[in-house]
Image: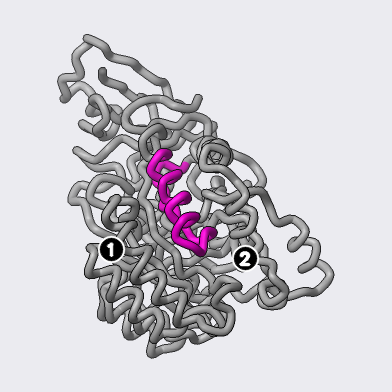
């Protein structure tokens, strides 16, 4: 089947020569075509261009569906490269605790935070976890996300970590989204290892990683490398063990302070280092010499009232930057990438063009799929969304309280309209 989108007000994020990412000054530039068409053949993008050139292609009329996109923008779907959307229940009591003045660290030290989610998850069946996760998946699809990375990390023991990863595998099988799975056993130190954190690192290395790899449950391995959680030395051991089983690293780093996570991430060629609210020149220089993506999560900073990552310094230093939602029950209970884009404009001082690059192509790189997703290019998978009638790309982030996504196309098929 072929799908022809006609009279597109503006076709956004096109590439003639597909790139892995966009960095530095080039992030300010967004290639678009006004008054455009786009032809999809089965699940792939076959052709696109100005409407006045549509006659040059052989569209054919057999099994052709046409959509008039007058007044509307068409963009590649968001690639959300950092989420924790498989979880049980919610943590609104911690939300009100923070309103009363408790810090994220204080809540964690009192048994809340990640440990609270781990207790809830332990009591929840795999089927119930799947039902809750499916609901969140439907929500992010409606908001324009077409690819998502999902982490474990609320199990904190072999049985429950594997339960989470099996839920993610089931989501991969029955969702139109492109999903990548990350093993994050090192998300927090469980109570049974409270005074012996190295013992939990040993458990992850000896009991969890071999099974995760043996059952092919994860694409990546992640570590929460922060003071009070896992040290650079712990992270080094965990990443080395993961690499032996073919799990490429992604790291939580520099959210609470200068944790050393960027250095370890670059050492092990991490696909991305995420958060980065605290960054110095040394860390920026390390990233500039690497192939590791700097991934920023402004939703967490907004929700926790914490500092925002220095996006302008990173981009002005020539780095590529990705944006992700950090969808999770404690520090960012939203997978709305349109809102993430608005926060990036307002708080990180990124331009709308930089935001689109960060949330599409660079996000795709940060989850290892930029060869097939993240831009409008011939041969790439047709994961797209069509906006309601709006004047330009700036308006998508200016109207921060509105869902301006009208139609969603995943794998070449309309899944939301």
Q: Is residue 92 above or below residue 388?
A: below
225 over 297 or under it: above or below:
below
Residue at (62, 50) in percent of width and height: 123
The answer to whether residue 416 is seen in the rendering is: yes
Secondary structure under tag 2 reads helix
- Residue found 41% across the figure and 71% down from its top: 203
Q: Which mark is residue 247?
A: 1
Please state the horizontal and vertical placement of residue 381, each as a whole percent of the image.
Answer: 27, 38
Q: Kindly check if marks 2 and 1 are in contact, taking CB atoms under 8 A apart as contact.
A: no
In-front residue for pair 410/73: 410
Numbered disc 1: secondary structure: loop
With 92 as the anchor, is 280 left or right in this view? left
Q: How many marks?
A: 2
Tell me the residue that label 2 is attached to.
115
Of residues 39 and 183, which is closer to you in this image?
A: 183
Q: Residue at x 60, y 65 (%)?
A: 114
Q: CA distance from mark 2 to mark 1?
A: 25 Å
Note whether 50 is above or below 82 in the view shown. Answer: above
Q: Is residue 21 left or right of residue 329?
A: left
Residue 289 placement, left or right of 312 = left
Q: Residue furthest bottom?
A: 282
Q: Quadrant of the N terminus?
A: top left
| Coloring applied to the structure | one colour
> What span is colored magenta in the figure?
145-171
Query: Furthest residue to the right?
Result: 100
Vertical arrangement, residue 258 with respect to residue 269, above or below: below
């Amino acid at each position: 089947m072929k799908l022809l989108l006609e009279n597109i007000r503006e076709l956004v994020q096109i590439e003639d020569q597909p790139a892995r990412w966009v960095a530095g000054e080039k992030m300010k530039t967004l290639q678009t075509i006004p008054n455009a068409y786009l032809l999809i053949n089965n699940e792939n993008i076959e052709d696109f261009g100005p409407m006045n050139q549509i006659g040059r292609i052989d569209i054919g009329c057999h099994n052709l569906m046409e959509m008039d996109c007058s007044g509307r923008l068409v963009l590649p779907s968001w690639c959300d490269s950092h989420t924790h959307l498989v979880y049980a229940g919610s943590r609104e009591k911690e939300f009100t605790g923070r309103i009363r003045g408790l810090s994220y660290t204080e809540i964690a030290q009192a048994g809340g935070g990640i440990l609270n989610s781990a207790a809830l998850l332990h009591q929840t069946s795999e089927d119930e976890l799947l039902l809750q996760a499916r609901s969140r998946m439907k929500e992010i699809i409606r908001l324009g996300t077409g690819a998502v990375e999902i982490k474990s990390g609320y199990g904190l023991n072999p049985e429950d970590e594997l339960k989470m990863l099996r839920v993610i595998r089931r989501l991969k099988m029955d969702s139109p989204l492109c999903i990548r799975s990350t093993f994050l056993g090192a998300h927090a130190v469980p109570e049974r290892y409270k005074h012996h954190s190295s013992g939990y690192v040993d458990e992850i290395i000896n009991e969890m990683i071999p099974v995760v790899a043996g059952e092919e449950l994860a694409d990546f391995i992640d570590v929460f490398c922060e003071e009070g959680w896992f040290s650079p030395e712990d992270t080094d051991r965990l990443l080395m063990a993961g690499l032996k089983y073919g799990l490429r690293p992604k790291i939580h780093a520099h959210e609470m302070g200068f944790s050393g996570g960027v250095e370890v991430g670059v050492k092990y060629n991490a696909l991305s280092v995420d958060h980065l609210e605290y960054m110095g020149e040394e860390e920026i220089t390390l990233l500039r010499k690497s192939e590791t993506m700097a991934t920023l999560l402004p939703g967490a900073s907004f929700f926790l009232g914490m500092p925002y990552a220095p996006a302008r310094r990173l981009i002005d230093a020539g780095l590529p930057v990705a944006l992700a939602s950090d969808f999770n029950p404690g520090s960012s209970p939203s997978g709305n990438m349109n809102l993430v884009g608005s926060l990036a404009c307002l708080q990180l001082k990124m331009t709308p063009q930089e935001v689109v690059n960060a949330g599409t192509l660079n996000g795709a790189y940060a989850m290892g799929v930029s060869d097939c997703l993240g831009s409008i290019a011939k041969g790439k998978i047709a994961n797209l969304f069509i906006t309601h009638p709006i004047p330009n790309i700036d308006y998508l982030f200016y109207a921060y309280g509105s869902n301006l996504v009208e139609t969603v196309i995943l794998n070449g098929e309309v899944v939301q309209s």
